[in-house]
């Protein structure tokens, strides 16, 4: 096992799994400790390995300031030499294992890069003249896997589904995490394992592997629905994120089983199933600071501000919703009432799943009504075959922090009505889930503002 410094800056040649594992671990430790010290110096916050996947969400709110931009630039400059060394080492490891060099792109995918690093540290090097022995089908786990294509596919799907259900239960029910390991690492791993089982006795085509990957993902979703672990709405929302991860996992497993290495029957790759619970535990022990998001929606009302104000502070019951989002189960506003007036008054905005309790912080009639939120109802009513299903993500994972209505007088007796909500959500990748939450909150805003507009413009 030879280690050379030149391994870090040249992409030519090969490297064995031992030096690759050592170099990767050493470089990761150095880089992590440098970043940990810098982040602690800047903000006093702790920094974990999974925070690299959230770096953009950590720095982005601070980038308009000069300090935020300088911190981002410094961390980027510090990362470049380590990134270059990682790419060089990965290229040589792929060449040594006779795997496609395009797989180096996985080095840049959060969470998956950790799993892929473990995979490359397990797969042995192979010389062009190597002739791998045939797989011993009479040893575990080969004796458990059918030889027929259909039987092997079913075995892979069942294995992936069982491991997925177990890990989802561990992550969401026990650890109460909805993080990178659940939505990125788990779909990749379950598809990867399904294809390892499917191709155990015979090589499969890329088309077959990708098809089984998607079927295994769909089967896992159905299983989670049937065992009352998740509802249909959350599963549908997760598909645009989970499906590409499953295809990537199936593609990596296809590349491995397509080579002669897989015929040697080295079953150590099945240990990648243990990476996901380890990452879940890291996310649970070292949770990331929550970024606060805001959504603002505006509308022109053909009425003076004084009249609009009365309908903002409280309003009568809205008509039944027509939007598909609300019919799918997302909570929607029904009415609003207020106890008292001025700062300290208590506003109650009643939704289909319960009331928001909103103490008034700013009462600037008829210009600004600002409030905090002390109680949040469930964000949705899940579609499920069971009556009392309540997944963990219904309790505090989408949390309104405050809101306001701003009224701006316009010429001609008109008013610009603007509603803003500040909120947190505890689901990662935060940027992906923000697309959904922003859209949901924007739709809720429009329902309220249109109702206020209708009341204010009435005779």
Image (cartoon, rainbow, N blue to C red):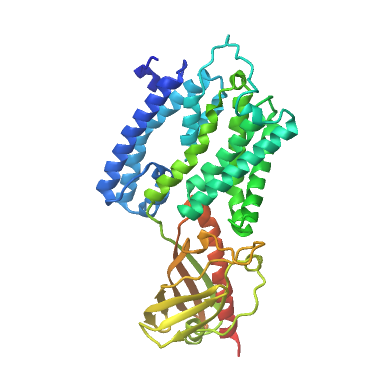
Most distant residue in the top direction = 129
Query: Is residue 9 visible from the viewing direction of this image?
Result: no
Q: Where the C terminus falls, by quadrant?
A: bottom right
Q: Nearer the viewer, residue 366 or 270?
A: 270
How many marks can you see?
0
- Looking at the rendering, which quadrant does residue 372 occupy? bottom left
x and y percentages locating residue 346 in the rendered image: 41, 82
Which residue is at a point 46% across and 63% down the rendered structure image?
A: 396
Image vertical order of residue 444 relative to residue 68, above or below: below
Query: Is residue 217 visible from the viewing direction of this image?
Result: yes
x and y percentages locating residue 17 in the rendered image: 45, 21
Task: Please state if 454 lies on the left or on the right of 115 as rendered.
Answer: right
Q: Where the N terminus falls, by quadrant?
A: top left
x and y percentages locating residue 342 in the rendered image: 37, 85
Task: Please state if 190 lies on the left or on the right of 65 as rendered.
Answer: right
Which residue is at a point 43% across and 83% down the rendered structure image?
A: 366
Which residue is at a point 65% across and 77% down the rendered structure image?
A: 320
x and y percentages locating residue 417 in the rendered image: 50, 76
């Amino acid at each position: 096992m030879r280690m050379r410094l030149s391994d870090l800056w040249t992409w030519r040649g090969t490297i064995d799994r031992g030096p690759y594992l050592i170099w990767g671990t050493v470089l990761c430790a150095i880089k992590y400790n440098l970043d940990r010290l810098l982040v602690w110096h800047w903000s006093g916050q702790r920094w974990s390995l999974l925070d690299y996947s959230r770096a953009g969400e950590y720095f982005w709110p601070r980038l308009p300031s000069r300090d935020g931009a300088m911190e981002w630039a410094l961390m980027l400059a510090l990362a470049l030499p380590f990134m270059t060394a990682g790419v060089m080492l990965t290229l040589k490891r792929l060449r040594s294992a006779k795997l496609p060099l395009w797989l180096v792109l996985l080095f840049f995918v959060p969470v998956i890069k950790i799993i892929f690093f473990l995979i490359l540290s397990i797969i042995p090097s192979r010389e062009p003249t190597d002739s791998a022995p045939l797989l011993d089908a009479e040893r575990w786990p080969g004796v458990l896997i059918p030889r027929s294509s259909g039987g092997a596919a079913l075995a892979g799907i069942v294995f992936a589904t069982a491991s997925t259900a177990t890990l989802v239960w561990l992550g969401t029910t026990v650890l109460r995490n909805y993080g990178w390991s659940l939505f990125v690492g788990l779909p990749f791993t379950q598809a990867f394992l399904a294809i390892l089982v499917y191709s155990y006795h015979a090589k499969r085509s890329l088309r077959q592997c990708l098809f089984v990957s998607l079927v295994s993902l769909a089967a896992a979703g159905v299983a989670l629905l049937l065992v009352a672990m998740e509802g249909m709405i959350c599963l549908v929302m997760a598909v645009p994120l989970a499906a590409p991860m499953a295809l990537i996992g199936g593609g990596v497993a296809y590349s491995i089983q397509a080579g002669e290495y897989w015929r040697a029957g080295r079953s150590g790759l099945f240990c990648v199933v243990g990476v996901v619970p380890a990452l879940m535990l890291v996310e649970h022990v070292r949770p990331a600071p929550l970024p606060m998001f805001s959504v603002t929606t505006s509308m022109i009302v053909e009425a003076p501000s004084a009249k609009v104000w009365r309908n903002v502070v409280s309003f009568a019951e809205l008509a039944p919703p027509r939007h598909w989002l609300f019919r799918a189960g997302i909570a929607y506003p029904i009415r609003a009432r207020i106890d008292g007036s001025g700062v300290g008054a208590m506003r109650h905005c009643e939704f289909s799943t319960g009331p928001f309790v909103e103490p008034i912080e700013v009462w600037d009639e008829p210009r600004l009504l600002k409030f905090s939120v002390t109680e949040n109802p469930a964000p949705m009513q899940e579609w499920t075959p069971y009556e009392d299903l309540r997944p963990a993500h219904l309790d505090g994972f989408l949390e309104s922090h405050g809101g306001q209505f701003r009224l701006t007088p316009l010429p001609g007796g008109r008013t610009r009505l603007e509603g803003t909500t500040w909120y947190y959500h505890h689901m990662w990748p935060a940027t992906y889930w923000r697309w959904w939450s922003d859209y949901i909150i924007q739709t809720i805003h429009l329902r309220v503002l249109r109702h206020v507009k209708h009341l204010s413009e009435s005779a």
